[in-house]
Image (cartoon, rainbow, N blue to C red):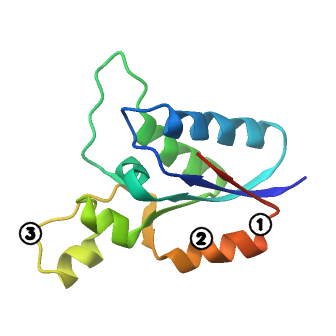
């Protein structure tokens, strides 16, 4: 069995990228592979927002990522620089930048590109969506 990290560049809604990454993650786990982390970069950081509210008849992708992470011990990381530019803010970043609030969803953390670099060096496979 292989260990994987996924790199998600697509937004939570508006393209198929993030949903395809989620479906790929589920398939990996069913096959017995290890998914160590999912790194959300560029517009993909929107997957980590606690303020997305899909319509009742739509799949709640942000919540699905969180549930998958909790169930399987997967690290969900948003690129801190990309997230700050797009308004996805952790409580630590909100305090540091003297902002009035934060909106990073539970189960998500903010990390630098060093975390992605480490995954590139240590995981068997890194798959980009």
Label drawn at residue 123: 1
The picture places residue 109, in percent across and down from the top left corner, at: 44, 67
Residue closest to the eye, 85 or 89: 85
Snapshot quadrant of residue 129: top right
Residue drawn at x 77%, y 66% is 123
Label drawn at residue 73: none
Disc 1 crowd, CA 10 A, few/some/many (<14, 14-19, 20+): some
The picture places residue 80, in percent across and down from the top left corner, at: 38, 71
Of the two numbered discs 3 and 1 on the same chain, state the one appearing first in sequence.
3
Is residue 42 left or right of 32 when viewed as pictured? left
The picture places residue 100, in percent across and down from the top left corner, at: 9, 69
CA–CA distance in space, label 3 to label 2: 29 Å
Snapshot quadrant of residue 10: top left
User: Of all residues shown, which one is farthest toward the right?
Assistant: 1
Secondary structure at badge 2 equals helix
Q: Is residue 80 above or below residue 22?
A: below
Residue drawn at x 11%, y 80% is 98
The residue at which mark 2 appears reads as 116
Label drawn at residue 100: 3
């Amino acid at each position: 069995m292989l260990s994987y990290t996924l790199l998600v560049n697509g937004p939570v809604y508006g393209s198929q990228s993030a949903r395809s990454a989620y479906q790929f993650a589920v398939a990996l786990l069913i096959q017995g592979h290890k998914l160590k982390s999912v790194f959300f970069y560029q517009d993909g950081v929107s997957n980590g927002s606690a303020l997305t509210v899909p319509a009742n008849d739509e799949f709640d992708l942000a919540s699905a990522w969180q549930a998958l992470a909790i169930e399987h011990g997967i690290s969900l990381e948003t690129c801190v620089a990309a997230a700050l530019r797009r308004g996805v803010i952790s409580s630590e970043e909100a305090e540091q930048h003297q902002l009035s609030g934060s909106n990073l969803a539970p189960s998500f953390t903010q990390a630098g590109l060093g975390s992605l670099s480490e995954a590139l060096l240590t995981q068997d496979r890194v798959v980009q969506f």
